[in-house]
Image (cartoon, rainbow, N blue to C red):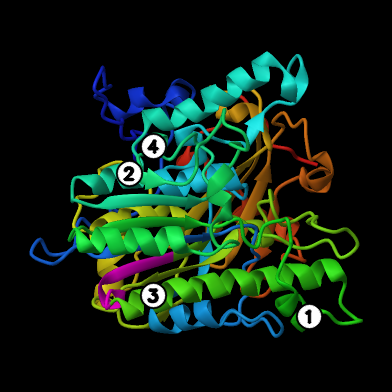
Amino acid sequence: MSQSTEVMAKPSAAKTPVKWALALIVAASLTACVSTKQSQPTETAAEDDTPPNIVLILSDDHAWNDYGFMGHDVVKTPALDQLASEGVTFKRGYVPTSLCRPSLATIATGLYAHQHGITGNDPSRKLPGGKNGAEYNKQRGEIIAKIDHVQTLPQLLRDKGYVSLQTGKWWEGSYQRGGFDEGMTRGFPEKGGRHGDDGLQIGRKGIAEITDFIDRTTAANKPFFVWYAPFMPHTPHTPPERLLKKYQDPSRPESIAKYYAMIEWFDETNGQIFDYLEQKGLKDNTLIVYVSDNGWVTNPTMAERFLPKSKQSPNESGVRTPIMYSLPSKFAPQMRTELTSSIDIVPTILAAAGVDVPQGLPGENLYQNMVQQTPIERDTIYGEGFAHDMDDLNDPESTLLYRWVIEGDWKLIVSYDGKNVSYQKYHNDFLVAPRLYNLADDEHEQHDLADQHPELVARLKAKLADWYPVKSRNILTN
């Protein structure tokens, strides 16, 4: 089945476009975009239920297998392990785009990067004057303005009475611009406003902003929504000495020891939130959602650097992440093997909150599947990757480097000739002909089977074309 790229326009006191497609700056170049998603369940939580509180947790630069419950034999994540055992855990979760800013924008809007238009972290560093030039700063503002043309999760929850708090990473200007009622981030052009400024203190300097907010909203008898996106385990890797000592070993590079310690530090902060919800009697009716924005593989020879095939890449170590949903009053513990994507988070949260899921969102509403423990009728998910620096702000294809599709155990990665002016060393070896992997046998993508299965490659390429057609970029063939 296919669908149009209609997306929801944000209400405005001045003039507001009626059609979703008109709300997207990028729509002119992508009017034929389609999705092969199955028909979406429309069930939401019962109207007479008390809306659940919502805590959305986003780790930052965190590899998909660096958790205790994912089988890591060194990293300690007791809080997230407990969440995995108590909630609904999708071990085969994915983010469509493995770069923080577009990935976070997808989680906030329920739209793919080519739909919301925020495909990279920054404007092109090749603009006249470079990063300090007037045109660069002008384009920074233009990228942020894209959030004004789509609805965000806190805005969609507001009509149900939710009060929302932003903490941690947030690229799109101030917290108010994202539709949050309260927040920590002042945003560009304020000092340090590139991706979170004051918000980046959360977790590393405690969680008092979150616990105070919970106290105030519950005292007012209001359901709350917390965006907890700490700058963890993201660099700078500065864990407490007590944690670093646990991971230091003569056989382990110091860069890896610091990264592991950062993961446990991040996990501790989650445990503090979970314990507070328990102490306040809020745990049973609080929906906790967990996802990482993108993957990471630490460079063993360089401090605070990552290796290719992880962050920014379409490979498993770039796009795969466990995704968890916990709502004890509704969900029995479940370890699920189906494919899922961060594109599903917005419709699923809305359904749990009793908010009608807008038509046209590309993700699946998984709420009833988790309540009733029924199979998800979908075997295919999609993703796309763009250069770190945006080029033509109104044409996502200008920097398109990858698209990928997973059908069951098969994964196809297709590369494109989009413009890339930064981080070339992380991409050069992978801007090659289409690659095919069987993830059941090769979850680290060591064996390209494209030459052995040309018919399967052709069929999966056709699925990508049906998802949305690429008009101005060329597929790389060698």
Q: Which mark is residue 276?
A: 3
Does dot 2 land on a helix, a strand or a loop? loop
Q: Is residue 129 above or below residue 377?
A: above
Tell me if mark 1 has few (under 14), some (14-19) or many (20+) residues whose alpha carbon lies within 10 angstroms of its own.
few
Residue where numbered disc 4 is placed: 176
Asked if disc 3 and disc 1 are in contact, CB closer than 8 Å, the reply is no
> Can I make out residue 332 in this image?
yes
Q: Earlier in the sequence, mark 4 or mark 1?
A: 4
Q: Does label 3 or label 4 sit earlier along the sequence?
A: 4
Q: Counting residues from the N terminus, which is met first, the one under dot 2 or under dot 1?
A: 2
The residue under label 2 is 181
Task: Label 1, secondary structure: give it.
Answer: helix
Counting residues from the start of the chain, the first of labels 3 and 2 encountered is: 2
Task: Tell me the SS state at disc 3.
Answer: helix
Residue 144 location (% of width, % of height):
50, 29
SS for dot 4 = helix
Q: From this view, report whether residue 365 is shown above or below residue 90.
A: above
At a point 64% along the width and 32% down the height, the residue shown is 122
Q: Which residues are magenta?
A: 281-289
Answer left or right for 131 relative to 84. Answer: right
Residue 275 in which image quadrant:
bottom left
Give the residue at mark 1: 245
